[in-house]
């Protein structure tokens, strides 16, 4: 990233207030205060219909309840065999938020927007939602990404082919990205991020005045916002006259934190940290607010796995301020822990073929389900690729899409519900309640009945092993008989009973039916 001096343009005065630098002790004290001061805000990860095993970010909820977001994934439709290797693409997706608060299955935006030759990334709309500005990136010869801003208009036949913004915005030999378009009475303002020369630090926030479709020369947002570090993902809320952005240099609690400052253009007030739970000790960015000014979305790579805390990828989170003056009904219905547990049951967890411990005749295993789940995810591309067997054309594509949908929805959803269950189980046991669950194990009918019973038992044991290590080992004393309150019944049932064409390998091991058969089911006992 380039560093340089701030260019003060002759036609615009920039007021910069230089604060006295904080000592290391003062900085640490402020960091501790931010980390402890938790705000009355609900922050929850969006479901697997939005968040995949890869990286999702840059989300936006339109007034018509269409939910737009960016996802960086492997191109499973065209390159299944390299699902987890080199074939990575960024596409813009859309879903719909239903009246019940659920998200419909996400669909990729048309190829006029999503170029197959470029990374299609963060974006913004105008107020009428007939103009889209997005980031497109290409790989340079040394493997780095070079990003530029593009614009598309919504015509009678849909989104038109995007055109690159002028070179006043897309300065050669620099990256320009993360647009935020604000419409004022007499002009528009395009905030964006760039590492162009003459900035304050690495990545800076810049803006351009737009009149009659013409983009003025970009101006740095100034020293109040920009630092010698990186400032990214600007979002300007006109109703609040407030700029939200993320920085790795302003005082935060770890990684990129979300900040805000009131003002506009180059005139800004004091920069404030958004605090916890908006921020974590990981990377938090792409903050934006819905029209109600009480809810919105952000992206973060904070851990969402209760076992290994995987932080490889970004997920999209929904937030909502909790009304402190909300009138509580006289006779509120309290949701019991038992009702919470019942709400996530039954849970179905899925396994790879002959997993765990292939070709074993043992009833037990040392592996745990979190490990098996991760291994399954890493093999998704292989299963999707092989699921079509000798099929061709549209039939092949349909079979592969069905398998990919199953992997993303059913397999991932089961694991998410398992994590919720462990939280509820712990809550119940800490209150002194007794909880009884049943775990049934199944296998696909590819082996003889005795072998399938052993395999079903191992799958059940893998879940028990998971419970031994999850929540810091909280359940171990209950599983080993040192404490009472958790009653688990094991029910290995062997093969699922139905007709199966075992003569066609691709219809068994890699088929969708076989994938659905390899499972355990957790129910109330």
Image (spheres, grey):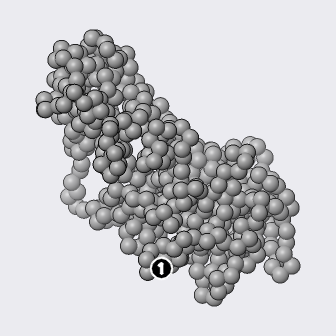
In this view of the protein, which residue sits in the foreground, 158 or 416? 158
- Left-right relation of 17 to 369: right
In this view of the protein, which residue sits in the foreground, 278 or 220? 220
Which residue is drawn at the image coordinates 26% and 34% (left, top)?
Answer: 507
- Left-right relation of 120 to 351: right
Q: Is residue 233 above or below residue 308?
A: below
Quadrant the C terminus occupies: top left
- Left-right relation of 168 to 298: right
Q: Position of residue 363 (x, y in %)?
A: 26, 13
In this view of the protein, which residue sits in the foreground, 158 or 441? 158
Which residue is drawn at the image coordinates 33% and 52% (left, top)?
Answer: 394
Which residue is drawn at the image coordinates 43% and 38% (left, top)?
Answer: 381
Element carrying mark 1: strand
Which residue is drawn at the image coordinates 28% and 23% (left, top)?
Answer: 459
Q: How many marks?
A: 1
Residue farthest bottom in this picture: 186
Report whether residue 35 is seen: no
Q: Position of residue 158 (x, y in %)?
A: 44, 74
Report whether residue 48 is seen: yes
Q: Position of residue 220 (x, y in %)?
A: 76, 68
According to the picture, the residue beneath numbered tag 1 turns out to be 155
Quadrant in the rendering for residue 15: bottom right
Q: Position of residue 178 (x, y in %)?
A: 62, 62
Q: Is residue 327 above or below residue 137?
A: below
Quadrant in the rendering for residue 266: bottom right
Q: Is residue 366 above or below residue 161?
A: above
Q: Residues within 10 Å of mark 1 (few under 14, many from 20)?
A: few
């Amino acid at each position: 990233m380039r560093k340089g001096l701030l260019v003060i343009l002759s036609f615009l005065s920039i007021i910069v207030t230089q604060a006295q630098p904080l000592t290391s002790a003062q900085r640490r004290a402020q960091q501790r205060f931010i980390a402890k001061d938790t705000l009355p805000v609900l922050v929850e990860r969006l479901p697997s219909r939005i968040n995949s095993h890869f990286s999702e970010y840059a989300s936006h909820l339109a007034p018509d309840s269409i939910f737009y977001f960016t996802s960086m994934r492997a191109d499973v439709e065209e390159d299944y065999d390299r699902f987890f290797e080199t074939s990575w693409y960024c596409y813009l997706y859309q879903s719909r938020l239903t009246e019940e608060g659920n998200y419909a299955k996400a669909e990729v935006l048309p190829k006029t927007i999503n170029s197959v030759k470029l990374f299609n990334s963060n974006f913004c709309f105008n107020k009428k939602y007939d103009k889209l500005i997005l980031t497109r990136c290409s790989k340079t010869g040394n493997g780095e990404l070079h990003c530029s801003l593009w614009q598309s208009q919504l015509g009678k036949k849909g989104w038109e082919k995007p055109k690159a913004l002028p070179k006043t915005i897309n300065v050669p030999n620099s990256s320009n990205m993360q647009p935020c378009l604000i419409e004022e009475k007499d002009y528009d303002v395009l905030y964006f991020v760039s590492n162009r020369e003459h900035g304050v630090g690495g990545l800076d926030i810049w803006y351009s005045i737009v009149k009659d479709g013409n983009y003025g020369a970009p101006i740095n947002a100034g020293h109040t916002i920009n630092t010698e570090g990186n400032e990214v993902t600007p979002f300007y809320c006109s109703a609040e006259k407030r700029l939200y952005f993320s920085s790795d240099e302003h005082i935060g609690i770890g990684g990129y934190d979300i900040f805000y400052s009131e003002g506009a253009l180059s005139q800004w007030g004091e920069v404030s940290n958004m605090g916890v739970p908006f921020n974590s000790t990981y990377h938090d960015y792409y903050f934006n607010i819905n029209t109600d000014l009480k809810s919105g979305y952000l992206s973060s790579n904070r851990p969402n796995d209760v076992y290994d805390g995987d932080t490889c990828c970004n997920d999209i989170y929904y937030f909502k301020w909790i009304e402190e003056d909300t009138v509580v009904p006289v006779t509120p219905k309290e949701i019991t822990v038992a009702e919470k547990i019942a709400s996530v049951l039954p849970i179905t967890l899925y396994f790879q073929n002959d997993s765990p411990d292939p070709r074993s005749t043992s009833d037990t295993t040392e592996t745990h389900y979190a490990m098996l789940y991760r291994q399954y995810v890493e093999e998704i591309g292989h299963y999707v690729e092989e699921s079509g067997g000798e099929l061709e054309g549209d039939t092949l594509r349909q079979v592969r899409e069905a398998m990919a949908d199953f992997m993303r929805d059913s397999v991932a959803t089961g694991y998410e519900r398992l994590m919720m269950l462990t939280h509820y189980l712990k809550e119940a046991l800490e209150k002194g309640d007794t909880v009884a669950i049943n775990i049934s194990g199944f296998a696909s009918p590819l082996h003889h009945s005795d072998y399938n019973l052993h395999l079903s038992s191992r799958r059940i044991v893998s879940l028990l092993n998971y419970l031994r290590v999850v929540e810091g080992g909280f359940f171990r004393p209950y599983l080993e008989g040192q404490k009472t309150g958790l009653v688990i019944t094991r029910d290995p049932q062997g093969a699922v009973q139905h007709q199966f064409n075992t003569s066609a390998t691709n219809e068994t091991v890699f088929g969708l039916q076989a994938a659905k058969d390899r499972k355990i089911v957790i129910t109330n006992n």
